[in-house]
Image: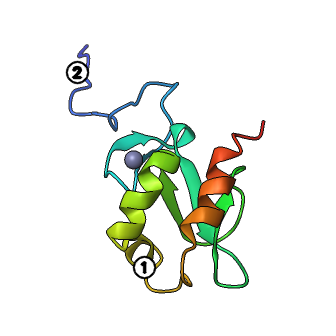
Amino acid sequence: MRLKARSGSRRKEELPANAGPVRCCIGCGARRVQEELTRLVVGPEGGVVVDRRRRLPGRGAYLCGVGCLAAAVKRKAFGRAFRGRAGPVDPSVLGQALESGPVR
Ligand SMILES: [Zn+2]
């Protein structure tokens, strides 16, 4: 009788259960768990809107918060993140939306 050694059945690297998908902030480039970032999408009008519930369809971009908004605008990160599909970003409007706090 011979026991077959089960070697080589390496699984995919398991991530900790509490860590969600990791995204990059388009302002400062920090990598964070998606939940810590604010998701932005291009709305139907072509403007960038805050997607607090992370439910809106389409390509998303992520920001740590309002502090990274100016950096993202300066770096023209929105154009890159949305592949040129985003309209002009109004930092004051977007900043207000970001500052209004997370919706739970
Ligand atoms: Zn950031």
**Residue neighbourhood size for the residue with mark 2, other residues' Cα within 10 Å, grouped as few (<14), some (14–19), many (≥20):** few
**First reached walking from the N terminus: tag 1 or tag 2:** 2
Quarter of the image for residue 103 reads top right
Q: Going 45% across and 86% down the picture, which residue do you hit? A: 84
Mark 1 C-beta to ligand 1 under 8 Å = no
Please provide percent x and percent y for residue 81.
42, 71
Q: Going 31% across and 52% down the picture, which residue do you hit? A: 29
User: Distance from label 1 to label 2 (Cα)?
Assistant: 53 Å
Q: Going 60% across and 63% down the picture, which residue do you hit? A: 92
Q: Is residue 10 above or below residue 74?
A: above
Q: Going 73% across and 82% down the picture, which residue do you hit? A: 44
Tell me if 97 is positioned left or right of 72 in this view: right
Give the color scheme: rainbow, by chain, secondary structure or one colour.
rainbow
Mark linked to residue 5: 2
Quadrant where the N terminus sits is: top left
Q: Which of labels 1 and 2 is toward the front?
A: 1
Q: Is residue 38 above or below residue 18?
A: below
What's under tag 1, amino acid-wise?
Answer: Gly
- Please name whichever residue, 82 or 94, is drawn nearer the observer in this view of the structure: 94
Task: Look at mark 1 in the image and give the residue it sits on.
Answer: 79
**Residue neighbourhood size for the residue with mark 1, other residues' Cα within 10 Å, grouped as few (<14), some (14–19), many (≥20):** some
Tell me if 34 is positioned left or right of 76 in this view: right
Tell me if 31 is positioned left or right of 54 in this view: left
Please provide percent x and percent y for residue 66.
52, 49
Q: Secondary structure at mark 2?
A: loop
Q: Secondary structure at mark 1?
A: helix
- Please name whichever residue, 87 or 59, is drawn nearer the observer in this view of the structure: 87
The residue most toward the front is 92
